[in-house]
Image (spheres, rainbow, N blue to C red):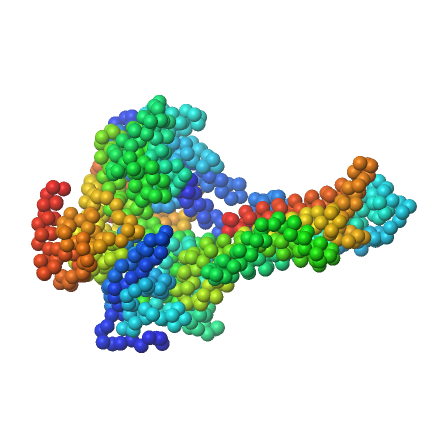
Amino acid sequence: MSSVPSRDDGAPLLEVVGLEKRFRSHGHVVHAVNGVSFEVRQGETVALVGESGCGKSTTARCVVRLTDPSGGRILYKGTDVTRLSQRAFRPLRREVQMVFQDPGASLNPSMTIRQTLREPLRLHRLVDRDGVEERLRQLMRLVQLEPGLLNRRPDQLSGGQKQRVGIARAIASNPSFVVLDEPTSSLDMSLRVALLELLEDLQRRLGMTYLFITHDFSTVRHIADRVVVMYLGKVMESGPVDDLLDEPKHPYTQALIAAIPVPEPRSRPRAKLQGETPSILRPIAGCPFQDRCPHVLDDCRVGEVPLLEVGARRVACLLYRDGAGGSALRAGTAAGSEAG
Amino acid sequence: MAIAGQAADVFEAVDLRTLELRRSERIVLAVRQNKLAAAGLAIVVAALVLSLVVPLLYTVDPLKPSPDVSLQAPSGAHLLGTDTFGRDILSRILHATRLDFEIAFSVAGIALAVGTVLGAFAGYAGGIVDDVVMRIVDLMLSFPAFILALAITVMLGNRVLFVIAALAFAYTPYFVRLTRGEVLKLRDAEYADAARVVGNPPWRVAYRHVFPNSVAPAVVLGSIVLGWSILDASALGFLGIGIKPPTPEWGTMVADGSSNITTGQWWTWLFPGLAILLVVLSFNWIGDGLRNLLRSA
Amino acid sequence: MTEALRMTEGLPAPQLLEVEDLSVSFPALRGARTTVLDRVSFSVGRQETVALVGESGSGKTVTALATIGLNHPSASVDGGRVLFEGHDLLPLGEAEKRAYRGKRIAMIFQSPKASLNPLVKAGEQIARVVRLHHDVSERRAEEMAVGLMRSVGINDAPRRYHAYPHQLSGGMAQRVMIAMALSSQPALLIADEPTTGLDVTIQEQIFELLLELKDRLKMSILLITHDLALVAETSDRVVVMHGGHVVEMGPVEAIFEEPKHPYTQRLVGSVLRADRRVRVQAAAAAVEGVVYATRGCRYAGKCEHVFAPCADIRPALLQVGAAPGHVAMCHLYDPAHARADRTDEQRAVSG
């Protein structure tokens, strides 16, 4: 039974509006998340992508309320849950779960797998005493692990096995919404694919919705329906996956995608983007990408750059205002690829 | 780092092997890798057993003075000789074992129990609670533990109970600080976050997840405090502030015997001194072993 | 052995680096030893980039460290030779090895910030290395260090000289490591996962830099990585390792377009792409955990084409496919074994 009544009017499952998260560090205020908006609809997989320091992990933590947002709103099934106290949020934890990045670190080393998996069952009183063991076995089977491993401790499992336990823990309460924070980043290639296939299979079977945090676009292409690209605490671009990856509109997205090595022999690396990501300690007015953008305009350095709608896409770039459609951008890109 | 990368290669390879070990093999392996600790443990257990069993067989009265056999060198009748009052040293050492172990385990036990809980609470709660607790701890730590215990014993008197209380009080701050450090680290550990997301209320995250994983260093310190408290009790006894005579206690025995250093009755101070040395060393070895065990876990 | 291997590879002799039948073991439990490298052989030619590819546990890092004698003290080299410019490095003493290490063969590691001394300024660390290899004054070494920093693309080098490692970003720290490594203009640079953990835009910059420097300094690169896309982008030849064996070797096109060994096939088949959705093989469901057979092929426990000789007989490294120097260690390609036993499926696989 859901603790938040669901609305059948097609409202998105999760809506994030103008989310902000500020930290204090060495006397400075760091805007880790600086006005992020996106939505996730029932049953889909939305990928939140960006490089280190973009704020994607912090956004994820705000969504599951591991940290409290400094501003903006988070709506789950249409209900504003931003200002809920930790105690009031707890019933929601049955429905909103998370899979963590480092399987070794996200499992309590002094607890057996059985104890770890039993916890959500007990906390939310999902099964009575007699049903616990059966449910545990069922969970293990769902993540393709032998039930014998229930008696082991994390240090007796391999990396891939630990990550599957993490997934089992997340689905134990039959959640509707799962946030996955780089779940395959620490795994070898062949394990990565197996795990992604498992996640997709579970999503179909259990009817879950995913928010998938990653820095790897090839994972995004494989598993996501829509993508949200972040940079320095803001959303640069968002839209359907194939559309966005084939024809990125924002200059940052274009540079990012151009930098991805393609497994074609004898392609040479050509860095489109020079310089480093600026430090988030020094807040800047205007577009966060202004110092590295090949198409920067004077207006980019002042005020807020709004998230403009371009077809099914949203792009935070002034090149697309007034429906300009980025013609200047296309001309610029053509010139760029001739020179490059 | 190079070695770490290499370790990953190697340990992936050795990985499966550890899983194949039976419990008995793991114990054997642990013993083999920590020989000193095993020896220490054996000595401590042997001492305890001896102290309980032997007096039943060897019924020489440790308290009764017999002036006619005073200061006799080790012989058939008195294996370790007699002291100034003609009391059998072996018997006294064995009886003292129980007392010294009682002091050691009480002090370490109390300091560990109180210190870890206080430290965990301060570390987890943070804020003003943490500040207040830590300032008190800092104050206590500015005195050497022994001096603190000395002052307290002088104030209260030298019954066993007061000696234990004084030493426990003096050692608690070390446990507080140690556990607080661990808790601060682990409060933000990924599995603590995972526990929160799963739906644990904050008290349960602290109690079930953070705290159990924070006590390992405290346990190691506890085993070392076992030894130190014996040394402290002995030192107090040496200064005449410790356990009241005629109750046998290793330290007071060394104190009594120290006046014989120049007169040549070496057995009056050597044997109780050796007892202290052996037991304290054993506790230290056990502590090392525990640290290795907990580090690899 | 060298002659035979070279002929198999179809490469000119002698190569810059020739690793021949290298075997390394570590102490394991119950007094036994675990063989982490089992007769590994490969070579790196002049001015070429060779990628050493494998997943964790394959032994690729141990191989690189064994080359310059930086293995953990408990490791024991049980056999083989490491010929650098014709000289065997393995039997050399520490002092003799140091004549090569850092001078003729340099190495950069993963996690550059962890590999730099946190207490010494970045530029100063480069200057120290310069003084190690060149007999110059402190001031001159400082100048050379700043010059090196510029040549690895560090802007504002004189100011960055005085930065401590924790003040640098990951990409910047890796450039510092590269500057240190290249200060003596080595003939061979070993790069152990140099960009794992760095952003992809930074990775692109670093490799653009490395390949440019390789051309300029006429250097060879031995790249250790698990990222196949990166291998395709940067390498000339690929050496695929699994379980302490070299299972396949060859030119990069051959490995990607016509992988022959079942493990390589699975690896290449599980590479996800950003430019299009990839259909991954159902058999990409990986089997984890390593079970080492003492004889025979070490992939036998996980191979879907395993048949009679695999568990007992170590496969020979044989020429496979059309490209020169494309070899694989698999019974499917050995006419001596793979006669009547082969199934139609196996025949299809090996072509």
Residue C304 visible to an observer of this rendering: no
Q: Position of residue C348 (x, y in %)?
A: 25, 48
Q: Count numbered badges in the picture.
A: 0
Task: Tell me if B198 is positioned left or right of B39 in this view.
Answer: left
Which residue is drawn at the image coordinates 30% and 29% (left, top)?
C143
Q: Is residue B211 above or below residue B289?
A: below
Q: Nearer the viewer, residue A336 or B49?
A: A336
Which residue is drawn at the image coordinates 36% and 43% (left, top)?
C166
Q: Position of residue B227 (x, y in %)?
A: 65, 49
Give the quarter of the figure containing the C terminus of chain A. Answer: top left
Task: Tell me if B135 is positioned left or right of C136 in this view.
Answer: right
Q: Which quarter of the picture shows residue C245?
A: top left
Residue C32 visible to an observer of this rendering: yes
Q: Nearer the viewer, residue B152 or B180?
A: B152
Q: Is residue A98 above or below residue C51?
A: below
Q: Nearer the viewer, residue C188 or C144?
A: C144
Q: Position of residue A100 (x, y in %)?
A: 37, 58
In this view, which residue lies farthest toward the right?
B68
Q: Position of residue B175 (x, y in %)?
A: 57, 54
Q: Is residue A36 above or below residue C216?
A: below
Which residue is drawn at the image coordinates 26% and 76% (left, top)?
A7
Give the quarter of the figure containing the N terminus of chain A. Answer: bottom left
Q: Is residue A254 above or below residue C321?
A: below
Q: Nearer the viewer, residue A103 or B21?
A: A103
Task: Tell me if A306 is positioned left or right of B290 in this view.
Answer: left
Task: Tell me if C221 is positioned left or right of A251 in this view.
Answer: right
Which residue is drawn at the image coordinates 69% and 43% (left, top)?
B277
